[in-house]
Amino acid sequence: MSQQPDEPTPEQLEELMRRLASGQLSPDDVAKIQSELASTLGMNVPPAMIQQAMEQMRAMMSGPDEGPVRWSLAQDAARKAAAAPDDEGTSDSSVSATARQQCLDALRVADVWLNGVTTLPASSTDERVWSRAEWVEASLPTWRPLCQPVAEQVAQSLSAAMAEQLPEQMRTMAEQAVGMMRRMGAAVFGAQVGTAVGTLSREVVSAHDIGIPLTAQGTIALLPTNIDRFGEGLEVPPEEVRLYVALRESAYARLFGHAPWLRAHVLSLVTEFARGITIDTDAMTEAVRSVDPSNPEALREAMSSGMFEPQRTPTQQAALTRLETMLALIEGWVDEVTNAAASSTLPSAGRLREAVRRRRA
């Protein structure tokens, strides 16, 4: 029978964390980690799994310190997600000269039509036609202020939750390793943000498609690859689909251009929502204790069960309600103005309007 390693002292644990950060982890170190997990959390983790986890942690911590989100990793993950082929085999590619000209023509026609239904003047000074990767690059600067408050609040909540659950003898070690933990969290959050942005790049049909301006002031843009996907199965001529999307994009641009405070207001509502994020520490502890770390399927189920899901407070719910109301008002105005401009001149306007509503729902 093999002899169990002695329980490490707090000083030995601190030294272990320093060696982990330096990339020097011996088999004895792995045994100490295994012993500590077994004695404090009741988890019997195989040494090979611990070693693999440590390697992944070192890889995540090897990059530059970019704050609560590692944006270089987010950019890389977003571009990879954007470039991945669709289920239909469609992949991101450079916009052809023909597609570019068709989209620019649609935007110019849209401006003429909108002049007849709204007094808000055209405010666009920069008309673009983008691939998915170009949308990623153009929108990332706006994602920073959107995601940064959320990342900061989640990091603070998780750090506090972990500190509460750690045994007394491990808290000094955790304090010593706080910088390492933050960098690891920044890498994880960066990968998540990047994947989400990259996935969204495969869906949006224009720069303002999600209801807030994600581009520089005065810039409007269409994504022809995604517009083509949106029109599939609608039995509507491609030029009508393109023109309807151009009308919506131009309407968004006029609204945000006429009310420059609107963008800041929407971003402030997102920030207010992020401030209220809290973590249910009891649920997290219970989930950790009940998971068999040697069973990958059990680990996946635990991660998707809500162990890290933020708990919504009344203040946070109020902020979310205000945000949803503002986005609904923006969408309602754009929908009405677009319909007014298209209903009498675009044969498929009604069908396209319904398709947009189903897509947003």
Image (spheres, rainbow, N blue to C red):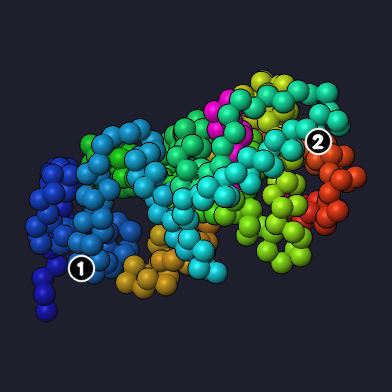
On screen, residue 77 versus residue 8, left or right, reads right
In the image, residue 92 lies at what x, y percent? 48, 56
Mark 1 — residue? 48
Residue under the image location 67 percent in, 20 percent down: 261
Which of the 4 image quadrants contains residue 262?
Answer: top right
Name which residue lies at 71% across and 21% down.
259
- Above or below — where is 316 with respect to 165? above
Q: Quadrant of residue 325?
A: top right
Residue closest to the eye, 28 or 42: 28
Q: Nearer the viewer, residue 137 or 228?
A: 228
Quadrant into which the N terminus falls = bottom left
Task: Please report the residue visible at 87 percent of the width from the left and 45 percent of the height from the top.
Answer: 345
Q: Please state the horizontal and vertical placement of residue 258, each as a whole percent of the image.
A: 72, 21
Q: Which mark is residue 85?
A: none
> Residue 4 or 117: which is nearer the viewer?
117
| Label placed on residue 113 | 2
